[in-house]
Amino acid sequence: MSGAYRLPSGGRINRQKPISFTFDGKKYQGFEGDTLASALIANGVLLAGRSFKYHRPRGILSAGADEPNALVGVGRDQAHYTPNVRMTMQELYDGLVAESQNRWPSLMFDVGAINDMLSPFFPAGFYYKTFMWPRKAWDAFYEPKIRSMAGLGKAPTEADADRYSQRYAHCDVLVIGGGPAGLAAALAAAESGARVMLADDQPEFGGSLLAETEATIDGKSAIDWVAEMVAALKARANVTLLSRTQAFGYYPHNSIGLSERLTDHLANPPAHLPRERFWTVHAGEVVIAAGSLERPMVFPENDRPGVMLADSARIYVNRYGVKPGKRAVVFTAHDGAYRAALDLKKAGIEIAAIADLRHHPEGPLVEAAKAAGIDVLPGTSVTGTAGRLRVKSATLARIGADGSAMDERQVECDLVLMSGGITPSVHLFSQSKGKLRFDEHLKAYVPGRPAERERSAGACRGLYALSAVIADGFAQGEGAAKSAGFGGVTARTFAVAGTLESDPGSFLGAAPHGRDASRVKAFVDFQNDVTAKDIRLATREGFRSIEHVKRYTTTGMATDQGKTSNMNALGIVSEALERDIPEIGLTTFRPPYTPVSFGAFAGASRGDLFDPVRTTPIHGWAAEQGAAFEDVGIWKRAHYFPKAGEDMHAAVERECKAVRDSVGIFDASTLGKIEVVGKDAATFMNRIYTNAWTKLEPGRLRYGVMLREDGFVMDDGVVGRMADDRFHVTTTTGGAPRVLAHMEDYLQTEWADLEVWLTSTTEEWAVIAVQGPNARKVIEPLVEGIDLSPEAMPHMSVAVGKICGVPTRLFRVSFTGELGFEINVPADYGRAVWEAVFAAGKAYDITPYGTETMHVLRAEKGYIIVGQETDGTAVPDDVGLGWAVGKAKKDFVGKRSIVRDEFQKPDRKQMVGLLTDVPAEVLEEGAQIVADPKQPAPMTVLGQVTSSYMSSVLGHSIALAMVKGGRARLGETLYVPMPGRAIPVKVVEPIFFDKEGVRLNG
Amino acid sequence: MQKFSGFGLIARAFGAHKSWQAQWRDPEPKQSYDAVIVGGGGHGLGAAYYLAKEHGMRNIAVLEKGWIGGGNTGRNTTIIRSNYLFDESAALYDHAVKLWEGLSQDLNYNTMFSQRGVLMLAHNIHDIQSFKRHVHANRANGVDNEWLTPEEVKEFCPAINVGGKDMRYPILGGALQRRGGTARHDAVAWGFARAADALGVDIIQNCEVTAIRRDASGAVEAVETTRGTIKTKKVGVSAAGHTSMVLDMAGVRMPLESYPLQALVSEPVKPAFNCVVMSNTIHAYISQSDKGEMVIGAGTDAYTSYSQRGALHIATHTLDAICELVPMFRRLRMLRMWGGIVDVTPDRSPILGKTPVKGLYVNCGWGTGGFKATPGAGNLLAWTIAKDEPHPINAPFTLERFREGRLIDEAAAAAVAH
């Protein structure tokens, strides 16, 4: 037997499969099909947690996703631990370990409950009014204390051991919610031939019908009807059924986020299963059949364990076969509670009384209750409850026309059921930006005009009677299919019998109780401990918009997102301000409908899969040589090639020396490459680059500079003219996508008349730079069809031929200041050619070098790196590239900007070189430069060090810097202020090695 | 104004808190004011407060089309820092941080400014270069900012995963501003509103400006609103994402683009993350609120829009980054996500000063970083309105700088190339 409160029969549980679990270390038993909540109720446990602020004992309030109180931590260890799990949604499995939260030392006895006694001093927003003195105490004392009191569960302390997966799907009709309306909608849409997806958050489809024991549909019991519908849907190839799947968010253009739980209900999940699957569904049409939520009654002490939503109690009895208590008082203004009372009575729970706030309740359900011998008390309110860890009694009073309470009497009970009516679940509709409409009769918001291709069906649009809900579901499903272009659905009716339907009635706001409303605690938001008096205080303090009230009191901001509280809060504000509800507004419904794991959003995106790893064809070779790599964007680039025992500095020193003395080999494949082709290619290049291209002959290279519209340097690179109508453009590694987008932008939007085509060829070419005095000697034997002599192939030329038998575009170009070649070969041949060159270079002790050495060598020559010397605030002249601007050119991107006065000023930051007095002193990159190092902060700063290295070839550190009026300061001594000292530096020309370029032209 | 204090709270508890009055009045708009602020966010309310407090202008109104603090003031991730690169920016944001440091006491409203430190993570060599430049520049400017090694990063913020082979972009260090932190965003708007109201400022909600009227000389003479015409010779516009539309009413075209920017919070948990961590490279911003929620910022959507919601994949990408930085947060759950509209200038720095129209002043273009500047922006806008000339701190942040080329481009300074 799984507990004293288990009914002898009934429910959708498997009594053959007992399940053991622990709660706060104590062992209990339940059955397969139980939730953690129903299994604890079966064992007579209703005390489930402590509230956020006052640490009041709280019980299980609901039976679904709207649960605000019964939150627990679940998981056998920290790598599988999840805080704030709703007991009502946690399916039971063997060995489940759950613990209560926000209490110390135990759930029964919680020291934090002292807050409840001090609660008169902690009204809504109290923290805005105090903790301000002394000033320093906020950070040091008050805030840490508040933080340790706040929070609910504990975050896991170990990395999550589970996996998550993601799927994208398209369908014609997505049906959200698998209750009576959703099933009928899915069937109708499926019969039309549309691709249908049906998602429901419960383990089995059926929604409210899973707790329906009286009604018949087409002559069958509700459960049998559900089974038949599900079987019919399953049999169709065009239907995807997703259970345990919450549609959590409605995003633009009918994209819906779904979260599917795959293993949280399993004792031993198979290793191949991810914990959750995150779906992004692009739906042609959406049918929202999300049902409705039951509204609590707001009355004094309505939060004691044992106070429960009436329909939830009915679900526990009918669906789970458990008794939530032995003797119940029902407090309602809604017929649904009568149905619950009747079902509970049938299950053997004594109904002490139904207190109905309505003065003249009537209808078949009321009559049925009276006929069953239940004491129905019209015009009666529950004005208070008693009991510490469980409700012991409720006080009932007749309510006069003026709201006064008369004839108070105490009724013993261990259960108080409440129902203020139903609130349609309009969350997803509202997220889709559909307009809501207030229904005075229902006292709830219902969907109005939709904004997306979407429609609501059944209870979520305010329908109540089962027959109406099913018929509406079918009609909306058919309508959705039709809108998606599918038809031919056979009309169908569903004969519902056995239910007692009536106009259900409802109530909004705080129930009258005749007590001092400014002192009693009548809870609106259970989890966040927001009471009716808090909301009234907020309105008194001038918070009149419902958004203000929400933010000031925190009502509706708990983990249930106000599912049970928002409407009552609205009712209380409306009463306090004496304004109609639609005038007060409504808080925005925000995704997700129920909380979704971060892991599900992230999916497989972790570690190496966090971002693609982009490697060059030569990467494997470099890795085999033990290269250290650096991340440049998503590229991996060889940073340096350390030999045994070498650190970076030693390796770089050796690599630099090898290039200057003999020859080095460098993988430049990451450089962006764009093929610019067409009759108007030269015109296009003239407009995109500052340089003039018309006169560049085929077979020649030119260093090109590209500006943004505002005149600042955007990118640079060497460009080869392959033919009159063809350019081989190179860009910086990181800039490649940006440059292509920039070019395409202009080509497509501004210069559509030009006949030019752009193709990204970055990954088509492997680029092998061979640099150094012996570079020519190394490659000469490998090259066919190209005359490499300085006369035939001077610096800045390009030729097409073969190397190692494969086609090449051979550039004679140098970013090192040495005689150099960049061998472009089709990427597939990259590694083979690299290895052949390397083998041929053995005779010259060819040395592979990485990006760090490349940086040192180019800095020795004063070549800039866009993004290092420039920072988006430099025009060409600032970095010594004035020569690259075609003065005679009519126009180019950025031309109009760089002629502005601001850019002609002599005190602009200009690129210079810096030398320290002490040769071994290497300045820090980013260090600031001042004239007077003794001035106090804020200092007048002249500029900053942009590049700084030890130059082993020069035997001296070198630095490039941007300095205000720098070119006029050559020879001056400036200072680099560092913590505790200032380093004197001499301003020099930004070129340190081979100023005449003799080696380059060798 | 009723003084707020712990004693007051206790004393009024015995009267069941019935004697608390409205924190600000709900007045009908007058026919004319000496100055009108358009936009009841933190910046606009701050401007009204400082106009009244520091410049003696009491006959002023704040016009808000919805409810105060309902725009970006109530939608941001509450990060406050001033470790900006350029001198102009550092001065601007540090002016704000200095005001933040005494704001609760100044307003007699607990804004919960928490100097828990803002740590910006470096994931590649370019980041290191950029952050070190920031550290050096900030030191010269007297703004605190220090470089941390990966070990120091781990020590300062134990929750984050700093590296190892399991991380695509290991953390190579970080820049820490200890004076940076967070504040309670709503409290800032309410605190300014209450204090401004006490000085006589009319805060008028549900009042949308529909036109700006100018006299024969072109100067501002009145604003038309949904609640009637209000005469005034000075109008300060502080309308964030909708600034372009308001300025358009006076014929001023603004160099602004408006984008949705999203943020999200987790369910509340006990203290598990002790500071603010930002990673521009992998796009993640995270801190834990006093309530216990992890507050997480995403990037902007790629397309301009006035819709206050963004696309799902943006949030997905953000949580990729959070899970990579803090793998033990994978089992936390997203509680709420939302969007705001940020107004972005070509150089990502704000525009705060005069406009070509006499009597019309503007404060906008704060992009994704306006909250941190709230008291500073309000303070400087007030100065500019009162004196009809900018304060030296906001003097560089003119509208004209885009024509002149005097950009203050913080974003480009952090851009990755090479």
Image (cartoon, grey):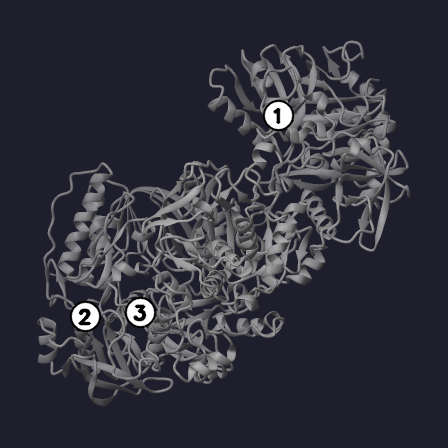
Residue A37 screen position, x and y as percent: 35, 73
Q: What residue does disc 1 label? A: A673
Image point 83% across, 51% down: which residue? A934
Along the line of sight, which residue is nearer the eye, A502 or A762? A502
Q: Tag 1: Cα neighbours inside 10 Å, few (<14), some, or many (≥20)?
A: many
Tell me the SS state at disc 1. strand
In the displayed structure image, the side of residue A976 where residue B278 appears, left or right: left
Tell me the SS state at disc 3. loop
Q: What residue does disc 2 label? A: A336
Give the vertical position of A508 relative to A941 (above or below): below
Residue A718 screen position, x and y as percent: 68, 22
Q: Amino acid at mark 1?
A: Lys
Q: Tag 2: Cα neighbours inside 10 Å, few (<14), some, or many (≥20)?
A: many
Along the line of sight, which residue is nearer the eye, A510 or B93? B93
Image point 42% across, 74% down: which residue? A21
Q: What residue does disc 3 label? A: A63
| Chain where mark 1 sits | A
Image point 28% across, 72% down: which residue? A296
Quarter of the image holding residue A988? Answer: top right
User: Closer to the observer: label 1 or label 3?
Assistant: 1
Residue A735 visible here: yes
Label located before the other in sequence (3 or 2): 3
Give the vertical position of A844 relative to A558 (above or below): above
* Residue farthest along the front direction in this orientation: B216
Along the line of sight, which residue is nearer the eye, A274 or A341? A341
